[in-house]
Image: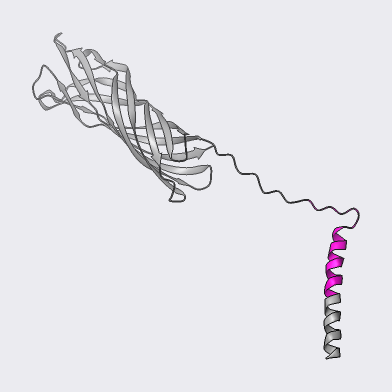
C-alpha cells in the first residue's frame, strides 16, 4: 500500500514538472507567439461579361399591304455578341446584350423572287434575370426584358427608297453558365425576341408599297464567361 502511494506521488510530481516546463518555455526571453490571422475573404464583384458566337434565326413572316397573300423571308446569320451583367444580389441581375448582324429580305408567296433589300440590324436588349445558385458550378438562369432594334445601312434591290422603321420588342431568355473557377466559365444562352417593324418603299414602276416585317428571331449563343 505504501509503495502504491509513493508511485502515485511520483507520477503526480512528474506531471506537474512537465506542465511547468512547458509554461516556462513559453515565457523564455526573446520568444513571442503571434496569433495566426484568418485569410481575408475574397471581395465579391457584381460585374460579369460574356463573349458569344450568336446564331440569329428569324421567323419568315411579313407582308406587303398592297399585295394580298404576300409574305417575306429573312436570311439567317452568325455574329459575335458581347453582354455585360450586373448582379444586384447573387440571384438577381440585369444583362445588356450588344451585337449587330446583317439580313437579306426577300419575297414569298405571290411575290416570290422579289429581292426587297438588305439591312444591318442592331438589337440592344436589356433583361432582368434570376440566377439559381444551388447547383454548384452549374448556374442556370432565366430572364425577361425589352429590346430596341435599329435598322441601318439599308440597301435597295428590287424596291426603291426601301426603309425599315426602328422598333421596340419584348425578350425572353434562358441559359446557363458552367464555372471552372471563381472567374472563368462557359455559357449557353437562348433568347426569343418578339420583333415586328414597319417598312415601305416603291416598285420599279413607282408604285408605293408598305407592310410589316415580323422577324421574331431566335438568338442562340455559346461562348465564354468572365466574372470579375
Q: Which image quadrant is residue 118 in? A: top left
Task: Decide which of 12, 131 is in the foreground and name it.
Answer: 12
Residue 36: x and y in percent read: 73, 51
- Its colouring scheme is one colour
Seen in the image, is 217 located left or right of residue 6? left
Residue 92: x and y in percent read: 42, 37
- At 71% across and 48% down in the image, what residue appears? 37
Q: Where does the magenta region start and end?
A: 14-34
Task: Decide which of 120, 147 is in the foreground and name it.
Answer: 147
Farthest residue, direction bottom: 1
Seen in the image, is 165 located left or right of residue 178? left
Q: Is residue 87 above or below residue 205?
A: below
Query: Magenta stretch: residue 33 in it?
Result: yes
Task: Decide which of 176, 31 is in the foreground and name it.
Answer: 31
Q: Is residue 147 above or below residue 223?
A: above
- At 67% across and 49% down in the image, what residue appears? 38
Query: Magenta stretch: residue 135 in it?
Result: no
Residue 139: x and y in percent read: 43, 46
Task: Decide which of 122, 175 is in the foreground and name it.
Answer: 175
Which secondary structure class fits the magenta region best?
A: helix
Q: Is residue 200 above or below residue 130?
A: above
Farthest residue, direction right: 29
Q: Which image quadrant is residue 153 in? A: top left
Amino acid at each position: 500500500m505504501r509503495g502504491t502511494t509513493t508511485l502515485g506521488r511520483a507520477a503526480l510530481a512528474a506531471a506537474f514538472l512537465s506542465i511547468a516546463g512547458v509554461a516556462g518555455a513559453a515565457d523564455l526571453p526573446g520568444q513571442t507567439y503571434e496569433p495566426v490571422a484568418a485569410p481575408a475573404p475574397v471581395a465579391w464583384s457584381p460585374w460579369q461579361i460574356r463573349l458569344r458566337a450568336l446564331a440569329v434565326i428569324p421567323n419568315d413572316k411579313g407582308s406587303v399591304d398592297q399585295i394580298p397573300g404576300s409574305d417575306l423571308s429573312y436570311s439567317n446569320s452568325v455574329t459575335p455578341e458581347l453582354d455585360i451583367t450586373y448582379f444586384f444580389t447573387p440571384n438577381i441581375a440585369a444583362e445588356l446584350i450588344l451585337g449587330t448582324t446583317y439580313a437579306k429580305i426577300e419575297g414569298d408567296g405571290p411575290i416570290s423572287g422579289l429581292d426587297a433589300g438588305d439591312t444591318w440590324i442592331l438589337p440592344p436588349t436589356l433583361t432582368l434575370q434570376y440566377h439559381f445558385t444551388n447547383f454548384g458550378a452549374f448556374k442556370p438562369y432565366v430572364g425577361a426584358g425589352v429590346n430596341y432594334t435599329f435598322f441601318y445601312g439599308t440597301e435597295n434591290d428590287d424596291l426603291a427608297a426601301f426603309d425599315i422603321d426602328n422598333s421596340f420588342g419584348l425578350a425572353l431568355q434562358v441559359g446557363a453558365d458552367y464555372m471552372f473557377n471563381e472567374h472563368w466559365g462557359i455559357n449557353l444562352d437562348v433568347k426569343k425576341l418578339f420583333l415586328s417593324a414597319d417598312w415601305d418603299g416603291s416598285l420599279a414602276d413607282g408604285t408605293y408599297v408598305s407592310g410589316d416585317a415580323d422577324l421574331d428571331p431566335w438568338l442562340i449563343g455559346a461562348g465564354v464567361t468572365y466574372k470579375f
